[in-house]
Amino acid sequence: MSEQAPDLLFDLNLTEEQRIMRESLARFSEIEVASISRQADEAGQAPEGFYDKTAELGLSLLSIPEAYGGAGIPRSVLSNMLNAEDLGKGDMSLALGALTPLSFVNMLLDYGSEDQQEKYLTGIADETFKIATVALMEPRATFDATTSSTSTIETTAVLSGSGYVLNGEKSMVALAEDALHILVIARCDDDVGAFIVDKGTEGLTIEKEKFMGLRPLDLCRVVLNDVVINVDARLSGEAQPFDVQRLVDLGSIGLSAVVVGCCQAVVDYVVPYVNERVAFGEPISNRQSVAFMVADMATELEAMRLMVYRAASRAEQGLAFHKEAYLARILVAERAMEIGTNGVQLLGGHGFTREHPVELWYRNLRAMGILQGVAIV
Amino acid sequence: MINLELPKKIKNAESMAHQMAASVFRPIARKYDTIEHCDTPKELIPMGQMLAAGAAAGQLGSGGSGSGGDVKNGGNMQAIVGTTEMAWGCCGLMLSLPGMGLGNAAISAVGSPEQKEKFGKLYCAMAITEPNCGSDSAAVQTTAELDGDEWVLNGEKIFATAADRGDAVVVWATLDKSIGKAAIKSFLVEKGTPGMSVVRVEDKLGLRVSDTAALLFDNCRIPKENIMGDPEIADTEAARKKAFGGVMQTFDNTRPQVAAMALGVARAALELALELLEKEQVKPEYDKSFFNSTALEAELYKMEANLEASRLLTLKAAWMADNKIPNSKEASMCKAKAGRVANAVTLRCVEICGTLGYSENNLLEKFARDSKILDIFEGTQQIQQLIVARHVLGKSSKDLK
C-alpha cells in the first residue's frame, strides 16, 4: 500500500467501459433479477438455471488469467463495485449469490500461489455456474476484524504431518451446500490464515440455516470436525501475506454496494407510489411529512453511495482504504436499515403485505449490519 | 474515472487555509466571541488584503490540474476546502474577513463588467431577509421605484451579514409587489448613501463576532445603473419564472459553501472532543467490530461517518458546479445533511466532554453555538428538504408547499 497517489482530479464520471457495462447490467438486473426476486424469496432458493445466466455475464471470470480460462482483464475494485450495485438493485440475495464465487477468486488472486491459482481457478472458469465461497463469520463471536493477534476467530488449523487439521464452526456461508471449494478463515498459531476445503471432505458438515432475509442466498452453517487438508491447501501469501482485515474491508465495500443498489430500488419504488396514492383528495406526497421522508431517503442514499465509492476508489488506486471502508460500513448499515423501514412505512398497511417488495427489502437490508466476508470487489 | 480524493492543487489550498485558520483565527476565536460587537478585528486585516489580492490576481477560483480530461476541479471546489478549513478555525471570524461578503459572491455571479469593476474590490454584504420574510424571498416588501436617473429604495432589511462593517450592500427589492417573484431585482447600495441607515446590530447565540445588521431604507436614492441583471420585468410567465430562477441559482453555489462551514465547525468540535477524550484513554482505532466498541466509541465512529458523508455530498455539489452540471438538488442535499450533522455533532461533543465541554475554557460550547445558524441561513433544514423532495418527487412549489 503506498500513499503515492497519482494526481487525479476529483471525478464522479464512469469510464466508457463502466458506462457500457452499467447499461447492460441495469437491463439484466431488471429483466432477469428483479422479476424473480419474490419467487426466489418464497422458494428460499434461486430458480433453476438462474445462476448459469449470471455466469454467462462472466462477472467472476473477468480477472482470472487467460491461461486458467478467464478473460485476463486486470481486476478493478471500482468496476466490481458498480456491478454489485447494479445487481443489488434487482435483488440482494441473488446479487450476492451470483457474485459469491468472485470473493473466492479475489482471495486466490490476492494470496494464492501460481500453482494454487491454476488448480482452483481453472475449475471455476466455466460458462456454467461453478460455486466456491468464503467462510469467515462464526456463530458465537461477533467478528472482530482486528489485527490477527487479537482477532476473535475461534476456528483453528493445526499443522500435523503433511497437512492441517481444521476444527470449528462457521456461519452465514453463502451457497456453501453446492460449493466445490470453501475458503475457511482460521487461526493457526498466532496467525490467521485461509485454507481451502473441498466439497465432500471428511469431517465437513454443511447445514442450511434459515434467516429473516437473504433467503435465496443459501446461507449455511459449516462445521469442521477434524477436517484434514493438504499443506498446500493453505493460501501461500506469496505476493502479499494473507490479510484478514483486507478481506473484511473488501467485504464491507462489496456488501455496501449491493445494499446501495437495493436502497435505490426502494426509493425508485416509493416515489411513484406516494405520488399516485391519494388520501384526502390529493397525492400523499403533497404532504411534507411524507415528502420529507422521501427527501431524507434520497439524501442519505446519495451519501452512502459516495462513501462506498470513495473506499472503492482508494482500494483501486492502491491507497490504504481501511478507515474509509469502516466508516462506509457504519453509515450504510445505519441508513440502509432506516431506508428499508421507511420503505414499508410509506406504503402503510400495503407495505406490510407480501404483495409489494418493500417488506422483502426491509428484511434483506437488515443483513447489512450483520453479514461479513463477501469480498466481491 | 471515479476518484474522490482531492488533487494536489486543491490539497495545497486546503493546507494553506488550515495554517491561516490555525495561526490567525484560533488564537483570537474566544476573545472576539466575548467582545462580540466591534469593528473588523485588526488581526484580520492583513489576511483580508492578502485574499483580496489573491482573488484579483486570479489565484483563487482557477481550476486544478491533473489527468482528468475534460473534468474540472475549479473555483467551487477550492472554495469548499478553503471555507471548511477557515470555519474550522472560527466561523465567526471567517465571516468577518473584509472583502469576502455574500454580496461579493452575487456580484461575481450576476454583476455587469462595470459593476464588477466598481464593486468587486469593495466589501459587499447581502440584504434579502425582512422582518416578515425569510426563506420566502419572493415575498420581499422593500420597494424600488425609478425616478428619473435614480432608483428610490424604501423598506427594512434584517439579518444582513457584514452590513455594518461592509462598504456596500446588495439589496433585494421589488419593482411591483403585485407581480411577485418576477419583479424582484437586486441593487447595489454604497455605504453612506443618504436614506440608508443601520438600525441595529443583532445580539446572537453564536457567530457573535460577525456583524448582523438591520438596515432601514427611507427614500434612499441610488444611480440607475446600480440595478443588477435585467432591469425589465419579464412579460411572459415562462420568462418570469426563468428570471427568478436565475436569482435563486446563486444559492446553488452558496449552499455548498454554508455546508462547508458546517463541516469545518463540526470537525473542529470532533477533533477537540477526541483530544480531550484521549486523555481519558478513549481513542477510536477503527479496528474493533462496531458491536464490540463501547457505546461512546460507537458514537464517535457514527459522528465521523456522518461527517465524512456530508463532506462527500458537499464536494459532489461543488464538483457539479465546477463542471456546469445543474446541482440544485445536490446543493440542498449537502446543506441539509451537513447542517443537521454539524448541529448534532457539536452539541453531542459538548455533552460527551461534560463540564469540559460546557465550560468557556474550551471552544466546544462555542462550536455548538456557532453551528446552529448553519442549519438555518441560506435556507433552513426544512427548506432544503422541501427542495430535495420537489426534485425527487417531481413536484412544483404549488403541489408541495
Image (cartoon, rainbow, N blue to C red):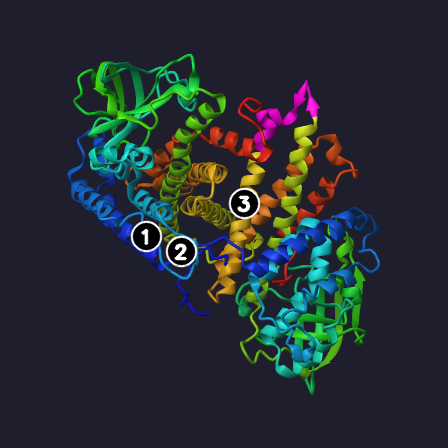
Compared with B129, A24 (above or below) is below
Chain under numbered label 3: A
Residue B81 spot, x, y in % from top left: 35, 48
From the viewer's perspective, tell me whether residue A246 is left or right of residue A139. Answer: left
- Using the image as rendered, state which of residue A184 and residue B255 is in the foreground: B255
Compared with A78, A184 (above or below) is below
Type of amino acid under label 1: Glu
CA separation in Å, label 1 and label 2: 10 Å
Residue A218 spot, x, y in % from top left: 77, 58
Which residue does the numbered mark 1 point to in the structure image? B14
**Residue A302: assigned label:** 3
Q: Residue at x 58, y 59 (%)?
A: A18
Secondary structure found at label 1:
helix
* Labels 1 and 2 touching (C-beta < 8 A): yes
Query: Along the polypeptide, which appears first: circle 1 or circle 2?
Result: 2
**Residue A91 in sight in this render:** no
Type of amino acid under label 3: Glu
Which picture quadrant has residue A115? bottom right
Residue A8 spot, x, y in % from top left: 42, 60
Q: Residue most toward the bottom?
A: A161
**Residue B6: assigned label:** 2
In this picture, which residue range is highlighted in magenta?
A278-294
Which picture quadrant has residue B190? top left
Q: Residue at x 70, y 56 (%)?
A: A95
CA separation in Å, label 2 and label 3: 19 Å
CA separation in Å, label 3 and label 1: 24 Å
